[in-house]
Image: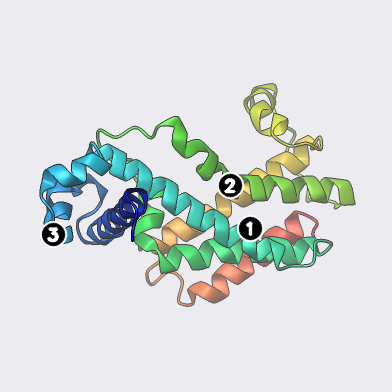
Amino acid sequence: MTSRAENRIEQTRTIQATGRRHLAEVGPAALSLRAIARDVGVVSSAVYRYFPSRDDLLTALIVESYDELGDAVEAADAATDPADLAGRFRALCHAIHDWARTNPHEYALVYGSPVPGYAAPDTTVTSAGRVTGAFLRLAAASETAGATVAATRPLTEAERAALEPVRAAVAVPLSDVRLLRWLMAWHTVFGHVSLELFGHMHRGVLDYDAHFSQVVDQLAADLGLD
């Protein structure tokens, strides 16, 4: 016999899965609990017992999306030889690329334009930080291994102060050059994926996979991982 708690978990999953389908059809701004209730086959008041507002459902979908991406990135990293820093970096980047292309609407939800009237609560922070954490752990490993990064212009005092929270999040102290290069790599990967998914490379790049691989290889070289 199914318990009340199990029923609640199952119904929550059904509502979230339906919400993801609607996300693909209408976008996050137009997400409607009433429309989702019709699809699930319950009265709207029943859905509100699980998600009191549209924002609560959005938050659940955001956390779910971040965690799925985090799972993909961490699994790719774990499947690679820990000593192969270049291989781990490539695996991490390609995991982001592959997940985003498989889940374009979820990627747009968490890395696209903000949803009007919605402010993500602190409950999303831990899940959101998983991919960043993977980058920073690899950056720390590259520092420990003594990888020689490509030179950058010296950081200004303003930039050094602005990056202090990032530096504080890494157990191993990172040099200015390494910290800046890794942040540039992070920006480049997500910038590339966003440009591709949102159609800004159309007819400008004819082979997205070849170009992405080239970009990742160049980043690995700039980070001194090869």
Give the quarter of the image for residue 196.
bottom left
Task: Name which residue lies at 75% across and 54% down.
Answer: 223
For residue 130, which numbered disc appears in the image?
2
Q: Nearer the viewer, residue 205 or 82?
A: 82
Label 1 belongs to which residue?
Answer: 74
Q: Nearer the viewer, residue 64 or 108?
A: 64
Q: Can I make out residue 191 in this image?
A: no
Give the quarter of the image for residue 94.
bottom right
In the displayed structure, does residue 8 sit left or right of residue 164? Answer: left
For residue 66, which numbered disc appears in the image?
none
At which x and y percent is residue 67?
Answer: 50, 52
Label 3 belongs to which residue?
Answer: 41
At which x and y percent is residue 201?
Answer: 41, 65
Question: Mark 3 vs mark 1: which is more N-terminal?
Answer: 3
Task: Name which residue lies at 27% across and 43% down.
Answer: 50
At which x and y percent is residue 106?
Answer: 37, 56
Question: Mark 2 vs mark 1: which is more N-terminal?
Answer: 1
Contact (Cβ within 8 Å) of mark 2 with mark 1: yes
In the displayed structure, does residue 181 sit left or right of residue 24? Answer: right
Q: Can I make out residue 40 in this image?
A: yes
Task: Name which residue lies at 68% across and 26% down.
Answer: 164
Contact (Cβ within 8 Å) of mark 2 with mark 3: no
Near mark 1 (Cα within 10 A), the count class, few <14, some 14-19 or many ≥20, is some
Task: Name which residue lies at 49% across and 57% down.
Answer: 68
In the displayed structure, does residue 33 sit left or right of residue 24? Answer: left
Amino acid found under the numbered disc labelled 3: Gly
Amino acid found under the numbered disc labelled 2: Arg
| Real-space CA distance between mark 2 and mark 3, rounded to the nearest whole angstrom | 35 Å
